[in-house]
Amino acid sequence: MKNLLIALMALAGWVVTEHAFAGGDAARGKEKAGLCSTCHGPEGNAPIAPEYPRLAGQPDDYLEKALRDYKSGKRKNPLMAPQAQNLSKQDIKDLAAYFSGLNGDLKVKY
Amino acid sequence: MRMRIVTLACLSFMLPLLAAPLHAAEGDAAAGKNKTAMCAGCHGIAGFRTAYPETYHVPKLGGQNAGYIVSALKAYKAGDRQHPTMKAIAASLSDQDMADLAAYYSGK
């Protein structure tokens, strides 16, 4: 009985980690970032227009939320909506992992 | 033909109107620094997470493009981006406030 309980808890733990906290793969994100760079600049740090954001160094969970919201339409933007439509959940995590790991000009400023 | 000339004339008068949004309020970084009271409590703390309605780390503002900061604030104000706290804060800002804050955060 005790063993069964332990097994169940381990299984629950695995399910939670796999599904809620599955991390992004920065290397795969880099492979998928070609289209992003055309506007956000190489390594997400030199956008081609002042209205476009730098991405390098932003927190991964923030970038992930932004792409999720563009995809769902919760965040309205005619340029980003179609881009995000083409991304899977895993693509979003991978891209977020890649851009958050880059060192750019962004910093916390009080 | 004549109609076409009239149309072209009308369009040429409208061109400056189309360009108008590009001449947004000029930002003053020093003035912006005095307006950060509502921003700093979250964006001024490294690793800070917003908790409502979703939990995630708030974005870094230092070094961000000024034009983007203004467009983000306007999007919150208009409801094109949804975050209750940011909507309330952005709604309280004038175009000049937004430009000043953007000038401050984007500066070195």
Image (tube, rainbow, N blue to C red):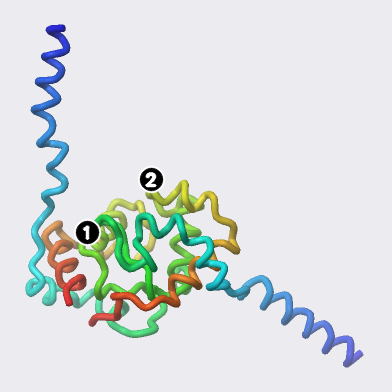
Q: Residue B16 at x, y = what percent?
A: 10, 36
Secondary structure at badge 2 equals loop
Query: At x 35% / y 55%, what residue is drawn?
Result: A39
Instruction: Name the residue nearer the viewer: B32 or A5.
Output: B32
Q: Residue B103 at x, y = what percent?
A: 15, 68
Query: At x 50% / y 66%, what residue is drawn?
Result: A95
According to the image, label 2 marks what residue? A78
Query: At x 13% / y 66%, what residue is drawn?
Result: B100
Mark sitting on residue B67: 1
Q: Residue A51 at x, y = what percent?
A: 26, 56
Marked residue chain, label 1 = B
Tell which residue pokes out farthest to the top in this image: B1
The quarter of the image holding the C terminus of chain A is bottom left
The quarter of the image holding the N terminus of chain A is bottom right
Is residue B50 in view? no
Amino acid type at circle 2 is Pro
Is residue B19 in view? yes
Q: Left or right: A107 with respect to A65?
A: left
Q: Is residue B25 above or below residue B36?
A: above
Instruction: Name the residue nearer the viewer: A100 or A4.
Output: A100
Secondary structure at badge 1 equals helix
Marked residue chain, label 2 = A
Instruction: Name the residue nearer the viewer: B48 or A36.
Output: A36
Mark 2 and mark 1, same subunit? no
Q: Residue B93 at x, y = what percent?
A: 18, 62
Amino acid type at circle 1 is Gly
Instruction: Find the distance from the CA under tag 2 to the CA under tag 1.
Output: 17 Å
| Callout 1 crowding tier (Cα within 10 Å): few <14, some 14–19, many ≥20 | many
